[in-house]
Image (cartoon, rainbow, N blue to C red):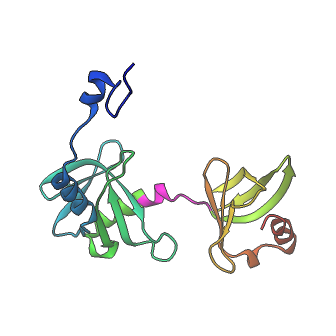
Amino acid sequence: MRGMGPGRGRGRRGQEEFTEFDEAAYEAQSAELLELRYLTKENCRFARTKGGFVSLVYRDRTYERVSVCRAFPFTAPEEYISVREPDEKAKEIGVIRALAELEPEQAQMIREQLALRYFMPKIRKITEIKDEYGYAYFDVLTDMGEAHFVIPMSGGAIVALSDVRLMITDLDGNRYEIEDVTKLGSGEQKKLDMYL
Protein backbone atom coordinates (compact mmCIF):
# COMPACT_ATOMS: atom_id res chain seq x y z
CA MET A 1 0.00 0.00 0.00
CA ARG A 2 1.38 3.42 -0.93
CA GLY A 3 1.92 6.09 1.70
CA MET A 4 -0.29 9.12 1.76
CA GLY A 5 2.05 12.02 0.91
CA PRO A 6 1.12 15.70 0.67
CA GLY A 7 -1.69 16.24 -1.80
CA ARG A 8 -2.57 12.56 -2.04
CA GLY A 9 -6.00 11.37 -1.18
CA ARG A 10 -7.60 14.75 -1.80
CA GLY A 11 -8.45 14.01 -5.39
CA ARG A 12 -9.65 16.55 -7.89
CA ARG A 13 -11.72 18.51 -5.42
CA GLY A 14 -8.73 19.48 -3.28
CA GLN A 15 -6.85 20.70 -6.35
CA GLU A 16 -9.80 22.77 -7.59
CA GLU A 17 -10.22 24.52 -4.22
CA PHE A 18 -6.61 25.73 -4.15
CA THR A 19 -6.11 29.26 -5.53
CA GLU A 20 -2.86 31.10 -5.92
CA PHE A 21 -2.12 33.97 -3.55
CA ASP A 22 -2.38 37.29 -5.38
CA GLU A 23 0.09 39.55 -3.60
CA ALA A 24 -0.65 42.62 -5.74
CA ALA A 25 -4.40 42.38 -5.08
CA TYR A 26 -3.74 41.88 -1.36
CA GLU A 27 -1.51 44.99 -1.21
CA ALA A 28 -4.08 47.07 -3.11
CA GLN A 29 -6.86 45.96 -0.77
CA SER A 30 -4.69 46.70 2.29
CA ALA A 31 -3.82 50.17 1.01
CA GLU A 32 -7.52 50.92 0.44
CA LEU A 33 -8.42 49.79 3.96
CA LEU A 34 -5.65 51.87 5.53
CA GLU A 35 -6.44 55.05 3.60
CA LEU A 36 -8.17 57.62 5.82
CA ARG A 37 -10.79 59.41 3.73
CA TYR A 38 -12.40 62.56 5.14
CA LEU A 39 -15.96 63.32 4.03
CA THR A 40 -16.56 67.06 3.63
CA LYS A 41 -19.30 69.29 2.25
CA GLU A 42 -17.14 69.67 -0.87
CA ASN A 43 -16.72 65.97 -1.72
CA CYS A 44 -19.90 64.23 -0.52
CA ARG A 45 -23.67 64.59 -0.32
CA PHE A 46 -26.06 62.85 2.08
CA ALA A 47 -29.77 62.41 1.37
CA ARG A 48 -32.75 60.89 3.18
CA THR A 49 -34.17 57.70 1.73
CA LYS A 50 -37.84 56.72 1.59
CA GLY A 51 -37.27 54.17 4.35
CA GLY A 52 -35.95 56.79 6.77
CA PHE A 53 -32.29 55.94 6.26
CA VAL A 54 -29.48 58.01 4.75
CA SER A 55 -27.78 57.55 1.39
CA LEU A 56 -24.44 58.98 0.29
CA VAL A 57 -22.84 60.13 -2.94
CA TYR A 58 -19.05 60.16 -2.64
CA ARG A 59 -16.35 60.06 -5.36
CA ASP A 60 -18.97 59.52 -8.08
CA ARG A 61 -20.27 56.46 -6.27
CA THR A 62 -23.74 56.20 -4.74
CA TYR A 63 -24.28 54.26 -1.53
CA GLU A 64 -28.02 53.58 -1.25
CA ARG A 65 -27.73 53.32 2.51
CA VAL A 66 -24.98 54.06 5.02
CA SER A 67 -24.59 53.61 8.77
CA VAL A 68 -22.80 56.00 11.10
CA CYS A 69 -20.98 55.53 14.40
CA ARG A 70 -18.98 57.68 16.75
CA ALA A 71 -15.25 57.14 17.30
CA PHE A 72 -15.51 58.92 20.68
CA PRO A 73 -19.16 58.61 21.75
CA PHE A 74 -18.74 60.14 25.20
CA THR A 75 -15.89 62.63 24.84
CA ALA A 76 -16.47 63.96 21.30
CA PRO A 77 -19.97 62.93 20.12
CA GLU A 78 -19.99 65.29 17.12
CA GLU A 79 -16.45 64.67 15.89
CA TYR A 80 -14.82 61.84 13.94
CA ILE A 81 -18.01 60.17 12.77
CA SER A 82 -17.32 56.97 10.86
CA VAL A 83 -19.57 56.44 7.81
CA ARG A 84 -19.82 52.78 6.82
CA GLU A 85 -21.51 50.37 4.50
CA PRO A 86 -24.45 48.85 6.41
CA ASP A 87 -23.67 45.16 5.80
CA GLU A 88 -22.10 42.74 8.28
CA LYS A 89 -18.55 43.73 7.25
CA ALA A 90 -19.32 47.44 7.93
CA LYS A 91 -16.53 48.61 5.64
CA GLU A 92 -15.65 52.22 6.33
CA ILE A 93 -16.32 54.66 3.48
CA GLY A 94 -14.89 57.69 5.24
CA VAL A 95 -14.85 59.90 8.33
CA ILE A 96 -16.61 63.18 9.04
CA ARG A 97 -14.08 65.23 10.98
CA ALA A 98 -16.79 67.36 12.65
CA LEU A 99 -20.53 67.67 12.02
CA ALA A 100 -20.15 71.47 12.27
CA GLU A 101 -18.13 71.35 9.02
CA LEU A 102 -21.10 69.98 7.05
CA GLU A 103 -24.05 71.99 5.72
CA PRO A 104 -26.60 72.34 8.58
CA GLU A 105 -29.25 70.14 6.90
CA GLN A 106 -26.64 67.46 6.11
CA ALA A 107 -25.36 67.50 9.69
CA GLN A 108 -28.93 67.16 10.99
CA MET A 109 -29.44 63.96 8.96
CA ILE A 110 -26.35 62.45 10.55
CA ARG A 111 -27.43 63.58 14.04
CA GLU A 112 -30.77 61.83 13.55
CA GLN A 113 -29.05 58.58 12.57
CA LEU A 114 -26.68 58.84 15.54
CA ALA A 115 -29.62 59.44 17.89
CA LEU A 116 -31.20 56.20 16.67
CA ARG A 117 -27.98 54.25 17.01
CA TYR A 118 -27.05 55.63 20.42
CA PHE A 119 -30.53 55.80 21.93
CA MET A 120 -29.85 55.86 25.68
CA PRO A 121 -32.59 57.02 28.05
CA LYS A 122 -31.39 58.93 31.10
CA ILE A 123 -32.41 57.46 34.46
CA ARG A 124 -33.92 60.14 36.70
CA LYS A 125 -35.16 57.91 39.53
CA ILE A 126 -34.64 54.32 40.65
CA THR A 127 -37.98 53.05 41.94
CA GLU A 128 -36.88 49.53 42.84
CA ILE A 129 -34.14 46.98 42.30
CA LYS A 130 -34.77 43.30 43.08
CA ASP A 131 -32.26 40.50 42.74
CA GLU A 132 -33.22 36.95 41.95
CA TYR A 133 -31.24 33.93 40.69
CA GLY A 134 -28.18 35.99 39.73
CA TYR A 135 -30.07 38.80 37.98
CA ALA A 136 -31.05 42.31 39.08
CA TYR A 137 -34.48 43.60 38.06
CA PHE A 138 -34.65 47.39 37.73
CA ASP A 139 -37.77 49.58 37.82
CA VAL A 140 -36.75 53.13 36.88
CA LEU A 141 -38.11 56.45 35.69
CA THR A 142 -36.22 57.88 32.70
CA ASP A 143 -36.48 61.03 30.61
CA MET A 144 -38.45 58.83 28.18
CA GLY A 145 -40.85 57.43 30.80
CA GLU A 146 -40.95 54.32 33.00
CA ALA A 147 -38.63 51.44 32.15
CA HIS A 148 -38.13 47.91 33.46
CA PHE A 149 -34.98 45.98 32.62
CA VAL A 150 -32.75 43.15 33.82
CA ILE A 151 -28.98 42.93 34.21
CA PRO A 152 -26.75 40.02 35.27
CA MET A 153 -25.30 40.46 38.76
CA SER A 154 -21.99 38.92 37.68
CA GLY A 155 -20.66 42.37 36.73
CA GLY A 156 -19.84 44.36 33.61
CA ALA A 157 -23.39 45.64 33.06
CA ILE A 158 -22.72 48.90 34.91
CA VAL A 159 -19.79 50.95 33.66
CA ALA A 160 -18.46 54.18 35.18
CA LEU A 161 -18.00 56.82 32.48
CA SER A 162 -16.72 59.32 35.06
CA ASP A 163 -16.74 59.74 38.85
CA VAL A 164 -20.49 60.40 38.80
CA ARG A 165 -21.71 59.20 35.40
CA LEU A 166 -22.79 55.58 34.79
CA MET A 167 -23.94 53.54 31.84
CA ILE A 168 -26.07 50.44 32.39
CA THR A 169 -26.49 47.82 29.65
CA ASP A 170 -29.36 45.37 30.06
CA LEU A 171 -29.62 41.75 28.89
CA ASP A 172 -31.04 42.86 25.52
CA GLY A 173 -28.20 45.30 24.85
CA ASN A 174 -30.27 48.42 25.61
CA ARG A 175 -28.29 51.17 27.31
CA TYR A 176 -29.34 53.56 30.06
CA GLU A 177 -27.43 56.49 31.50
CA ILE A 178 -27.24 57.99 34.96
CA GLU A 179 -25.75 61.42 34.34
CA ASP A 180 -24.92 62.11 37.98
CA VAL A 181 -25.38 59.48 40.72
CA THR A 182 -25.06 62.18 43.40
CA LYS A 183 -28.38 63.62 42.22
CA LEU A 184 -30.20 60.40 43.11
CA GLY A 185 -31.72 60.12 46.60
CA SER A 186 -29.63 58.46 49.31
CA GLY A 187 -31.94 55.42 49.30
CA GLU A 188 -31.56 55.07 45.54
CA GLN A 189 -27.77 55.33 45.81
CA LYS A 190 -27.72 52.58 48.47
CA LYS A 191 -29.77 50.28 46.20
CA LEU A 192 -27.41 50.95 43.31
CA ASP A 193 -24.23 50.54 45.40
CA MET A 194 -24.93 46.81 45.72
CA TYR A 195 -24.40 46.35 41.97
CA LEU A 196 -21.36 48.57 41.46
Identify the residue at the far top of this view.
1
Q: Is residue 34 left or right of residue 87?
A: left
User: Residue at (38%, 58%) from the top-left corner?
Assistant: 68
Assess whether residue 67 is covered by the magenta stretch: no
Identify the residue at the far front of this view.
1
Instruction: Give above or below for 50 relative to 168.
Output: above
Instruction: Give above or below for 45 relative to 188.
Output: above
- In the image, residue 172 lies at what x, y percent? 63, 47
Q: Looking at the figure, which quarter contains the C terminus?
A: bottom right
For the record, the magenta segment spans 114-121
User: Residue at (18%, 52%) from the top-left corner?
Assistant: 25
- Image quadrant in which you'd find residue 164: bottom right
- Image quadrant in which you'd find residue 129: bottom right
- In the image, residue 94 lies at what x, y percent? 27, 63
Q: Looking at the figure, which quarter contains the N terminus?
A: top left
Instruction: Give above or below for 149 relative to 82.
Output: above
- In the image, residue 45 lies at what x, y percent? 21, 60
Out of 108 and 10, give the one closest to the viewer: 10
